[in-house]
Image (tube, rainbow, N blue to C red):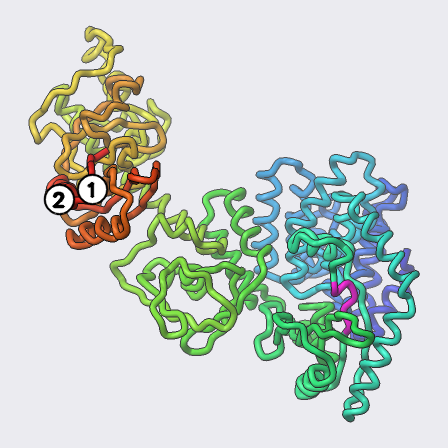
Amino acid sequence: MIRQFELVEAVRAYDPDADEDLLNRAYVYSMKAHGNQVRASGDPYFSHPLEVAGILVGLKLDVATIVTALLHDTVEDTLATIEDIEKHFGKEIAFLVNGVTKLSQLELQSDQSKQAENFRKLVVAMSSDIRVLLIKLADRLHNMRTLHYVPAEEKRKRIARETMDIYMPLAERIGMHEVKDELEDLAFVQLHPEARESIVSRLNFLREQGGNLVKPIIDELREVLQEHGLHALVMGREKTPCSIWRKMQQKNITFEQLSDIIAFRIIVETEAQCYQALGIVHGTYPVLPGRFKDYISTSKENNYQSIHTAVIGPSQNRIEIQIRTKLMDEIAEYGVAAHWEYKQGAVHDGHQYRWLRGLLDILENAEDPEDFLEHTKLEMFQDQVFCFSPKGDLITLPKGATPIDFAYAVHSGVGDHCTGAKINGRIMPLRTALENRDQVEIMTSKNQEPSPTWERFVVTGKARASIRRYIRQQKRHQFIDLGKSLIQKAFKHEHIPYSDKDLEPGIKLFDFHTLDDLYAAIGEGVKTTNELIRTLYPAHVSDKPKKEDQPKRKKKPADDALALSGLIPGMAVHFARCCHPVPGDQIVGIVTTGKGVTIHTTDCKTLARLKVSPDRWIDVTWNAKKNKEDDHIARIELVVMHQPGSIAAITGVIARHEANIINIKINNRSSDFYDFTIDLDVKDTEHLSDIIASLRMLSRVVEVERK
């Protein structure tokens, strides 16, 4: 263990003005508070906060952070309270200790929801003060260093998985690559011990066989730079076993096929010398195409800056080279802890980080902690692309991101009202995958709202969470409107007076909080109108016989049917894929639990097989004006002669009728005929009939039928 005077001297070595008395008091307070407590290793428990403080001293952090590290477990594991901490050490340290303590209280829960809730609290805490995250990372690092003392294998693997899923990417996000690499490797030991052992043994073999290879490469690179008048520090660094293993998996290659197990680093004084060194290296050695990246002109979100390239270097070895200044190297290794503003105590607020603000946006939009954890994993785990706004602002996104992701990264309001996008000045589909250096201009309209289909192709957690939030809100509004309509129709049919006041007893009887909750439950199919009537008016239905059989469909007055007006398909109303109803068809609705109403044509063969209680059948009608404005999917089947130009002739007819092909499928093909299924966007049955009639006029079309 670090002795008291050693800790104080280590802090004073980089901060001569450090509050020595505060450090001494914290050391003694923590040691006394933990008393005779011991860890799984048998060491005194006090050794843990002391080691955490030692890790943070190594990062040269401020006194408040070191003191918090010494005290971070006192509130959770001893009789000390936050009030005691504030009394003895002040509000700032009490705030930090409280932030770390709240995170620890759920940490050892194995339940997925508890882990998600823990991560949610971590994001909230570190958004208030990034030092909370630094202390938490140091705490996790020491726990991982001693994880082998935990006897239960299942618990070790769970902690290692949580480290790999959450803490490792967070360390990378704030640029602390040294901490990230160690966390990753310690977790790798527990999760994939055999793979790690195999890679380590191969690395040891390479060191024995080519132990003299690294030094000659370093010497030659240094000499080449000196010959051109550039003095630089050149070093070689072996990649971690886990990063090697991951690259083997991603590229589906063997260990022998890896060309960059050792990365060589050139450290110079100035940014201009970085580009000078790049020119010397590229002028001396053949460059490997596709491996050049300039993170100096466009730094990563965690402020990482470096030039990456790969060449066929000395002795025809394929080598990876990183070129950076001393300051860039320090930031690359220690991230936020290396920032001079941070060390002067000027910057602690976590909101300065765009990625962290993105996590807070996801937190605001997520329905529950598990939803939040899912989206943030999407946000943190993917490779990045760097895009620009028309004004030149840099937006960093995961690989595969689309203009919709870009729009939400700019602002939630921009995403919600996005109507289209220009990529490098050209209008492109919203599902287009963005590439490095793309300039993206988002077009918006106040009348535009998020489309549920966007969720199929967005990749960022923020975009997905925002879209899901909109869908949840709209679904609820739709279910409320639908439920209200269903209740009104049912009460009218049963000749029962209807008013909001008459329904209020149902709120308590069904254990809801508001009348809207009741409406939504009816609209969503969780409760039925018959259940509501039986509950509120038992005498009204007690003498009626039960109907077990499927009801016979009969035409009802138009005003007794539910009009499909203002209900968004895919939310409260779903059109059945078995019969693809379109305006003009006679239709019926089936209330499906959790989905709302599914619309079928009255002659749909599927209805005969549906075993649905009679009270879930409802009469519905098309809203003529509303549905004339919308397109509906219809399906047709064709038998066509196998001749050149047949498909072109069919699509030409469909285009002339201003219909859009959604999907086309060849079901069967012979030497003479094709069997097709085509899904079309049409206005109504009349529009569909015109298309079918025109298709039948084609000589090469043998048969056309609506399915």
Is the C-beta separation of discs 2 and 1 under 8 Å? yes
Residue 115: quadrant of the picture:
top right
Amino acid found under the numbered disc labelled 1: Val
Give the number of the disc on residue 697: 2
Q: Which residue is drawn at the image coordinates 53% and 66% (left, top)? A: 385
Q: Which residue is drawn at the image coordinates 81% and 89% (left, top)? A: 226
Q: Position of residue 264 (x, y in %)?
A: 77, 72
Residue, far left? 557
Residue 664 appears in the rendering: yes
Q: Nearer the viewer, residue 452 or 120?
A: 452
How many C-alpha atoms fall within 10 Å of the one at disc 2: few (<14), some, or many (≥20)?
few
Amino acid found under the numbered disc labelled 2: Met
Q: Which residue is drawn at the image coordinates 13% and 40% (left, top)? A: 689
The residue that disc 1 covers is 701
| Secondary structure beneath label 1 | strand
Residue 501: quadrant of the picture:
top left
Magenta-drawn stretch contains 551? no
Q: Which residue is drawn at the image coordinates 79% and 73% (left, top)? A: 316
Magenta segment:
259-264
Compared across the picture, whether 58 is left or right of 363 comes to: right
In the rendered picture of this protein, how many numbered marks are placed on residues?
Answer: 2
The image shows residue 364, relative to residue 113, as above or below, that is below
Q: Position of residue 454 (x, y in %)?
A: 38, 52
Marks 2 and 1, how far apart in space? 8 Å
Q: Position of residue 459 (x, y in %)?
A: 48, 54
Q: Nearer the viewer, residue 141 or 566?
A: 566
Compared across the picture, whether 140 is left or right of 206 comes to: left
| Secondary structure beneath label 2 | loop
The image shows residue 510, relative to residue 264, as above or below, that is above
How many C-alpha atoms fall within 10 Å of the one at disc 1: few (<14), some, or many (≥20)?
some
